Image (cartoon, rainbow, N blue to C red):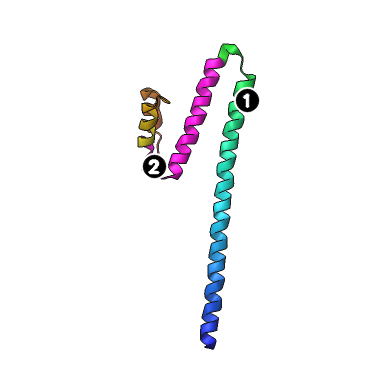
Amino acid sequence: WHAVKIVTAITTFFEVFYSNTCYGRYTKLYNLTRGALAHSMKITFLLRIHMDESVRKHARLAMRYVYCSVCLMIRAAKHTDPRTSLQEMCDKRWFTQAEAHCLGRHAPEA
């Protein structure tokens, strides 16, 4: 039984070590994702506050691109095909076909 105790102790150690490492990676990814969302909100608020009426359309376009980039980031995290995501955004009229085609050239391979 002495050998079983040693194997059990080693197995428990590696299981706890692995679980701790997984949790650390999860919290790091969670914090990075929350940071990306917070930065996108900051950009949106700064554009809204500091842009004059004369460039309101440009600010709206920039906010639309920020929103779409966040949506693409979330869809990429779900392992969705980027070209399908772009097409769905075109169908919802978030992008024009020309913008989707331009972005599709830079999309990673699925």
| Residue 82: in magenta span | yes
The foreground one among 29 and 98 is: 29
Q: Which residue is depicted at the point 56% across and 67% down?
A: 16
User: For the point 61% across and 31% down, which residue is it?
Assistant: 42
Residue that numbered label 2 is attached to = 80
Residue 23, image x, y percentages:
56, 57
Q: Is residue 13 left or right of residue 78?
A: right
Label 1 neighbourhood size at 10 Å, few (<14), some (14-19), many (20+)? Answer: few
Is any part of residue 105 visible from this angle?
no
Residue 8, position in %: x, y? Answer: 53, 78
Q: Earlier in the sequence, mark 1 or mark 2?
A: 1
Report the residue marked by disc 1.
46
Up-down: is 41 above or below 21?
above
Mark 2, Cα crowd under 10 Å, few <14 / some 14-19 / many 20+, is some
Identify the image quadrant of residue 13.
Answer: bottom right
The residue at 53%/64% (across/down) is: 18
Q: Which residues are magenta?
A: 56-83
